[in-house]
């Protein structure tokens, strides 16, 4: 019955094997003998199940998956053998028995809290444990066809929500009431419930409805548009601000299916679009079209940014591009997968050569202080000869 | 305009001062000279704003609040002076200027990732930095009247949602459709959007709708009822399971207002309640009534658990109490505040003497494998002479 109630495909065995083999290969390159993986998303990626436990992967001997709880669910979901444990203190002796330890160890130091790390150092009797973060990023950056299929299903939810938004959004509505209707619509079509962002203080909602003033407010988050939120204790998302004619309502929505996140943005306008926003909208469209013509396997992400920025400069919109003042961010796109801040980042700051199977959102957006903002966001998978869109949702402004 | 759009009260200056003074006092007791606070919720607690930045608190000299972004929002929200910085590398020199450093430092080692910690050790030139986690827990465990007022407003949202559930839930509905309607209702009444749980891998939704089989499934989370979820990639929350007559629909909902979380559970039944669930429901009610008669300032949390467990034993329900098999958890209640896993925990495992201003949820629940579950959850604030309820929502089963 558990299987019937799970609307997502289980991760196939060959997929798990190839992910773990990929990890082992990169560990060998870096001289890491044993990976000790504790973060839930990484455990899900390499095992196909999201239980409390520890995944140890030996470069030489392969995986040992220790599960504390739930063993019932783990057994139903992972193709790996399970080693049931009562507490993590049992792990070391079993690793020794299996000749996986002693070894040069590494952990996910980008997310593991110091207290947890110190506990593991003491349990394993290691003075230092290396960093696995970069290797895991490198393994996860290339999406398999199975993962791309999950992303496309995630995109179908997003498509339903953007369609519904055309019916829901009306002059005089509060942002938060639009948020309420659209979040509900996503759930009805199978949205997984929440989205994940990796790292300390990384919090997000699955929907951001902003309009006029609230689109322009700067926030602590590394995004061009965060919204005001209902309270300064959250500081992001929809507020009680009310929709007025001519000013774009910006809907930034993240689909979520089987863990995989899509992330697109559309603009809705009651009445006709105020002139201020027309050139920026056309520029955003040009940027998306230009990227689709230009980027493919082998293109450097810095060149993608440069091409986009050329269009921004031609339009004379540099000051408003990707935020204004302290709110301006230095990227135009970010990777997608099980977390919303995966690699690659499309930024002038560091080079990444695009490869087939990389997936990213491209989000040209313009913010005009005191007025509002406009933009588009579209998700792509990199292919040998170009970019493939993840969703089929049109990028046109929707007039309501 | 930012103020008009914020539906929550800003934290008053005297509240911030007293929180920081309390922290400084406890730091002095433990020989910590400088607290370096990076986690967003702790920064919000001690400053009243949730920006990217660093709060340094010297036991001798008081706070220095460094803000990277957004300075605009920080200025509108915190009563503290702001030190604008471009990057965290500037912090050390300013601390030295203010005679706050060199000093024996501590950080929130329960949540700060190793990579961030190592960076701060290098920036400050410190070999070791101590742990601030216990001190922060100890400061935050006692809620002020301002905080209790926020919790009560959070409880009003919860009350609206439980009322609405009586209209929404019907035989034949999928759990996820109930979730969609109730989540939307909460947003309309001002729910902040998401709830926070502290620590690695701690994820949660604001609503859990489970029914029959899905109430009984064990999960990796440390909760008696997690639900199946729509996908094994999330593994919690509502599923596509459909409501049948006589079996309780369990709605576990978290209100969220101005950061403050309430967390209660009610049972809804289409038709009449199957006999299996009747005694467990009465026992859960007795436990709640018993705790209200018994607990007050000075009571030990272990005695609260013991009294509850006596009732469970009299009813012969030990096997089903707080989960079954591997799903059984060893607490009956948990603290509430800005995070849902605050202190105190109501468990036989460790003593905590209840004090006025502590706030906790008490959640006697019973799980019957293959059948379903039933339970109640109610939030309390500890007072000198007893417990005060945070909400006024009746605990009766609602027949739909």
Image (cartoon, coloured by chain):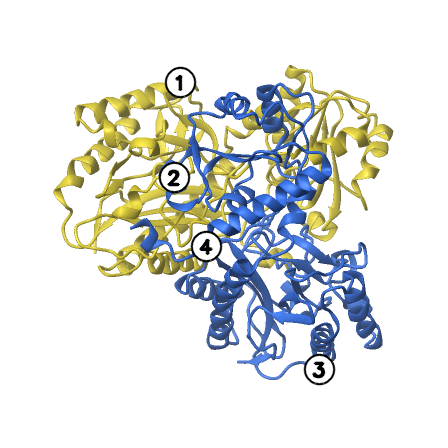
Chain colours: A yellow, B blue
Of the pair A358 and B57, the residue shown nearer to us: B57
Residue A187, percent from left and from top: 45, 57
Between B158 and B338, the one nearer to me in the picture: B338
Per the model, the C-alpha gap separating discs 2 and 1 is: 20 Å
The quarter of the rendered structure image containing the C terminus of chain A is bottom left
Q: Earlier in the sequence, mark 2 or mark 1?
A: 1
The quadrant of the picture occupied by the N terminus of chain A is: bottom right
| Tag 2–tag 3 contact (CB < 8 Å) | no
Query: Chain for mark 4?
Result: B
Q: Nearer the viewer, residue B209 or B156?
A: B156
Q: Secondary structure at mark 4?
A: loop
Of discs 2 and 3, which sits in the foreground?
3
Mark 1 nearby-residue class (10 Å; few <14, some 14–19, many ≥20) = some
The residue carrying mark 3 is B275
Residue picked out by circle 4? B193
Q: Is residue A392 visible?
A: no
Query: Distance from label 2 to label 4 (Cα)?
Result: 27 Å
Which of the labelled discs sits on residue A298, or is there none? 1
Taking the spot 50% from the left edge, 72% from the top edge, the residue there is B165
Q: Chain of mark 3?
A: B
Residue at image position (41%, 65%) is B189
Seen from this angle, which residue lies furthest bottom? Answer: B272
- First in sequence: mark 3 vs mark 4: 4
Disc number lying in front (3 or 1): 3
Mark 3 to mark 4: distance in Å?
Answer: 37 Å
- Residue B292 versus residue A331: which sits nearer the camera? B292
Callout 1: SS: loop
Q: Which residue is mark 2?
A: A390
Q: Residues within 10 Å of mark 2 (few under 14, many from 20)?
A: many
Whether B338 is drawn above or below A281: the answer is: below
Q: Which image quadrant for residue A395?
A: top left
């Amino acid at each position: 019955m558990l299987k019937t109630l799970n609307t997502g495909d289980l991760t196939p065995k060959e997929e798990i094997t190839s992910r773990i083999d990929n990890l082992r290969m990169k560990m060998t390159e870096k001289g890491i003998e044993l990976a000790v993986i504790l973060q839930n998303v990484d455990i899900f990626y390499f095992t196909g199940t999201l239980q409390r436990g520890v995944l140890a992967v030996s470069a030489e001997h392969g995986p040992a998956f220790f599960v504390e709880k739930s063993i019932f669910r783990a057994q139903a979901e992972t193709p790996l053998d399970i080693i049931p444990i009562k507490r993590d203190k049992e792990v070391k002796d079993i690793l020794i028995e299996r000749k996986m330890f002693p070894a040069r160890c590494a952990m996910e130091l980008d997310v593991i809290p110091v207290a947890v790390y110190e506990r593991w150092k003491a349990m394993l009797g290691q003075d230092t444990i290396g960093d696995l973060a970069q290797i895991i990023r490198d393994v996860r950056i290339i999406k398999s066809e199975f993962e791309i299929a999950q992303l496309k299903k995630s995109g179908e939810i997003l498509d339903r929500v953007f369609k519904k938004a055309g019916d829901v959004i009306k002059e005089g509505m509060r942002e938060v009431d639009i948020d309420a209707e659209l979040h509900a619509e996503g759930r009805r079509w199978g949205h997984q419930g929440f989205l994940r962002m990796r790292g300390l203080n990384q919090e997000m909602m699955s929907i951001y409805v902003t309009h006029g003033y609230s689109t322009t407010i700067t926030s602590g988050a590394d995004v061009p548009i965060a919204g005001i939120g209902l309270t300064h204790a959250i500081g992001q998302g929809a507020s009680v601000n009310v929709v007025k004619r001519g000013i774009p309502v910006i809907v930034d929505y993240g689909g979520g299916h089987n863990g995989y996140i899509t992330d697109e943005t559309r603009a809705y306008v009651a009445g006709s679009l105020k002139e201020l926003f027309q050139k920026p909208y056309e520029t955003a469209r040009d940027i998306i079209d230009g990227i689709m013509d230009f980027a493919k396997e082998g293109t450097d992400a810095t060149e993608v940014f440069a091409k986009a920025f050329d269009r921004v400069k031609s339009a004379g919109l540099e000051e408003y591009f990707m935020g204004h003042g302290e709110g301006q961010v230095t990227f135009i796109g970010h990777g997608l997968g099980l977390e919303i801040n995966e690699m690659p980042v499309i930024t002038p700051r560091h080079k990444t050569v695009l490869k087939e199977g990389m997936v990213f959102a491209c989000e040209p957006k313009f913010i005009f202080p005191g007025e509002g903002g406009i933009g588009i966001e579209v998700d792509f998978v990199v292919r040998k000869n170009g970019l493939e869109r993840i969703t089929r949702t049109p990028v046109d402004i929707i007039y309501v």
